[in-house]
Every structure is written in structure tokens, then in C-alpha cells.
Image (tube, rainbow, N blue to C red):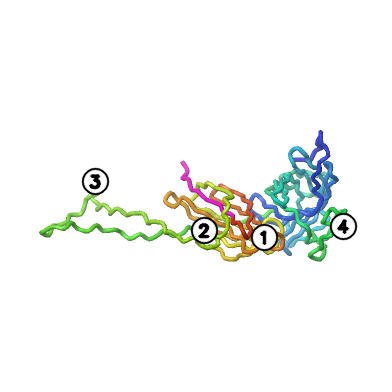
């Protein structure tokens, strides 16, 4: 995973210079905020600083260098060293090596991919390697303002670059830390209770004379055979007006093989007061909830008799930076899905779930 020079690189018109904000998630499910301030010279070289942070417990700032590959739209950039560190959690300091892919959806720009970490050792003989601090996934979105000190190369940006005019929304932070590798206890999903079904007793036949009814006997086990129970008929829920009056766009169909499904919803990128409501099978399960770095959670119970569910994400507002964007992370046993959600005041986002029993 060491960063090496790339050949046959040509000038690329896409300028990545600016502020990119989002998160990285470790392999064991730990969720941390992440910000890049990048300088890109419109060819292949890239440099800048990264900020990784959770809350007041740790914060870290590191310098970075790397390059951009035109043909694959891939940014390969690694942290050189930490320049500010603060931690009350203890543990070693790690630097990161990122492999990210650029994409654009409407007016939104994204850098998404993976990272591996390496123990930053101050010793003359460095025995660490990329991966000894673990790895995980990264998702960043281009924004116009930073939560930290705005680097000189962004303040000197040309008038064409809006970053130079972006205000610093928070005072400079003077200390930094790279997060320690901490295992997160697994989320235990409590299965939904099964519906209580009353036993159906067949009416006795109408005869002119009383007839003794002999219970059916299993001649092998000598146990009375239970009556046949019909499956409950699904409730026909009325369609809420917000689902009738807005377009409902199908974003993804996910096929799961575990009966217990956990859906987590985060703000995708800068936390800008996006607020959503969530409907499951036309029933309101989350009402006007704000998206943050902490997940909103919806649990689904699925089996062969209850094999389909539909979640609809409804934008209650568009936040400070339209549109309303969120990241959906779905966990079903060993399966894991990431879905990027965009909704507006005219369009809802729909994700369908299908259960297939494992063979």
C-alpha cells in the first residue's frame, strides 16, 4: 500500500483544491469525523492537511502528499506526519494512507474509498507498516467552509475558487490526535415479538341428532393434532399525503439473508441541520429527526412470511446546504451495504429490502 510514483500522467482539468468534509469508519464499525484541506495543481500532484476528530476526547492534524490519476479519477494521498495531537484516550498515534475515487452527482462532489493506517513511530528504525493500525472506509463531500484553521494555500485562492471567501465557522483548534484503534461493542438487535395468533376452532357439523366428536389422534405419537392456523392478513395501510404528493424515487433494492436488519442513517458530509422523517411500509417510524454524526436507527424483522419492507426517506428541510443528503449503512448478519441518499421537497428516496432464506 506504499505510495509510489505513477507514470503516463497527463494534465487533468478537474481541480480538487478546496475543503472536503465527511467521515472515516474503521473495520470494527467506529465512526470518526474527517476533513481534508487540499491543494491540487491541476496536473497530478496533490498536498494538504487532514483533520481527524471525534469530540473533545481526541483530535489530530497531519500533513499529506499524493497524486491524482486522471484515467481512473483516483486520488492516492498519504499522511506524512502528525503536527498536532490531543488525546485523553491514550493509545498509539496512527497516520493514514488513502485511496479515494472522485465522483459528481448534480452539484455535489465526492471523494470516497478506503484507507489503511500505520503506527507513527519517532524511532530511527521504523518497524511499522501500512495496515498495522487497521483500515476502513472513507466518504468526503466538497464544502465551502471549514471547522478549523483555513490553510494559507486556500486563503490565497483565486476569485474563481470560492474557498477563499469561505468563513471559518469555528475558532482554530490548537491540539490534535489520531484516534486509537478501539473495538466497538456489537449492536444487539432485539427481535420483534411475533404476532399472537388465536387458534381457530372449526364449527361442528349441523345434524338432526347430537353427534359425538372424536378428536383426531396421531396414531404414531398418540398426540392430538393441532388445528390449522391461517397466516394473518397484512394490514392495508393508507398512503400518507407526503408520499402521495411527492415523487418517490427508488434508490436501491437490497437483498438480505439474515432475519435481523439494522439501518443506520447519518448526515453525509457537513452537518448542516438536515432533518428527515422515515416511513416503513407507509407507517411513520421516525418523525422530523435531525441527521448528525450519530446514527438514527431503524430495525427490521424479516422472514419468509414477512419477506419485503420498504423505507421512504422524506426531507423535512434541506439544511443550510441543499439538497438533503444522508448516508444509510445497512447491517444484516455478515452483510453490509452503504447507500447514499438524496431527497428534496419534491422527491422522496425509497430503499426496498428483500429477504431470501440462505440455502
- Spatial CA distance of label 3 from label 4 is 86 Å
Q: Nearer the viewer, mark 3 or mark 2?
A: 2
Residue placed under numbered mark 4 in the picture: 155
Which residue occupies the foreground of this view, 338 or 26? Answer: 338
- Spatial CA distance of label 1 from label 2 is 22 Å
Quarter holding residue 176: bottom right
Q: Is residue 207 left or right of residue 256?
A: left
Q: Nearer the viewer, mark 4 or mark 1?
A: 4
Quarter holding residue 182: bottom right
Q: Main secondary structure of the magenta part?
A: strand
| Disc nearer the start of the sequence (3/4) | 4
| Disc nearer the start of the sequence (1/2) | 2
- Residue 81 visible to the viewer: no
Q: Is residue 271 left or right of residue 194?
A: right
How crowded is the residue under tag 4: few (<14 C-alpha within 10 Å), some, or many (20+)? some
Residue placed under numbered mark 1 in the picture: 293
Residue 8 rendering spot, x and y as whole percentages? 81, 33
Circle on res. 220: 3
| Disc nearer the start of the sequence (3/2) | 3
How crowded is the residue under tag 2: few (<14 C-alpha within 10 Å), some, or many (20+)? some
- Residue 171 visible to the viewer: yes
Circle on res. 280: 2
| Disc nearer the start of the sequence (4/1) | 4
CB under 8 Å between discs 3 and 1: no
- Spatial CA distance of label 3 from label 1 is 60 Å
In the image, the segment drawn in magenta is 349-359
Q: Quadrant of the N terminus?
A: top right
- Spatial CA distance of label 2 from label 4 is 46 Å
Amino acid at each position: 500500500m506504499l505510495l509510489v510514483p505513477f507514470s503516463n500522467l497527463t494534465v487533468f482539468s478537474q481541480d480538487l483544491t478546496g475543503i472536503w468534509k465527511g467521515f472515516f469508519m474503521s473495520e470494527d464499525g467506529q465512526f470518526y469525523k474527517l476533513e481534508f484541506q487540499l491543494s491540487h495543481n491541476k496536473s497530478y500532484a496533490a498536498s494538504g492537511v487532514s483533520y481527524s476528530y471525534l469530540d473533545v476526547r481526541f483530535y489530530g492534524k497531519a500533513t499529506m502528499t499524493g497524486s491524482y490519476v486522471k484515467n481512473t479519477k483516483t486520488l492516492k494521498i498519504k499522511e506524512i506526519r502528525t503536527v498536532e495531537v490531543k488525546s485523553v484516550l491514550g493509545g498509539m498515534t496512527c497516520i493514514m494512507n488513502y485511496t479515494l475515487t472522485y465522483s459528481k452527482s448534480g452539484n455535489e462532489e465526492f471523494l470516497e474509498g478506503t484507507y489503511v493506517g500505520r503506527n507513527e513511530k519517532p524511532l530511527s528504525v521504523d518497524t511499522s507498516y501500512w495496515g498495522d493500525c487497521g483500515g476502513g472506509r472513507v466518504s468526503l463531500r466538497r464544502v465551502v467552509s471549514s471547522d478549523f484553521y483555513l490553510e494559507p494555500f486556500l486563503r490565497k485562492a483565486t476569485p474563481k475558487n470560492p474557498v477563499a471567501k469561505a468563513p471559518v465557522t469555528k475558532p482554530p483548534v490548537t491540539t490534535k490526535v489520531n484516534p486509537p484503534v478501539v473495538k466497538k461493542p456489537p449492536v444487539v438487535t432485539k427481535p420483534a415479538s411475533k404476532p399472537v395468533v388465536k387458534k381457530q376452532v372449526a364449527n361442528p357439523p349441523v345434524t338432526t341428532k347430537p353427534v359425538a366428536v372424536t378428536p383426531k389422534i396421531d396414531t404414531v405419537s398418540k398426540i392430538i393434532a393441532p388445528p390449522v392456523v391461517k397466516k394473518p392478513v397484512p394490514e392495508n395501510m393508507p398512503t400518507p399525503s407526503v408520499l402521495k404528493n411527492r415523487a418517490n424515487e427508488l434508490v436501491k433494492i437490497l437483498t438480505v439473508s439474515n432475519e435481523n436488519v439494522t439501518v443506520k442513517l447519518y448526515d453525509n458530509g457537513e452537518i448542516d441541520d438536515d432533518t428527515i422523517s422515515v416511513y416503513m411500509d407507509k407507517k411513520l417510524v421516525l418523525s422530523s429527526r435531525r441527521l448528525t454524526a450519530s446514527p438514527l436507527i431503524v430495525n427490521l424483522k424479516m422472514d419468509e412470511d414477512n419477506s419485503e419492507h420498504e423505507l421512504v426517506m422524506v426531507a423535512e428541510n434541506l439544511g443550510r446546504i441543499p439538497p438533503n443528503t444522508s448516508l444509510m449503512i445497512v447491517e444484516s448478519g455478515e452483510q453490509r451495504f452503504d447507500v447514499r441518499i438524496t431527497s428534496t421537497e419534491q422527491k422522496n428516496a425509497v430503499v426496498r429490502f428483500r429477504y431470501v432464506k440462505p440455502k
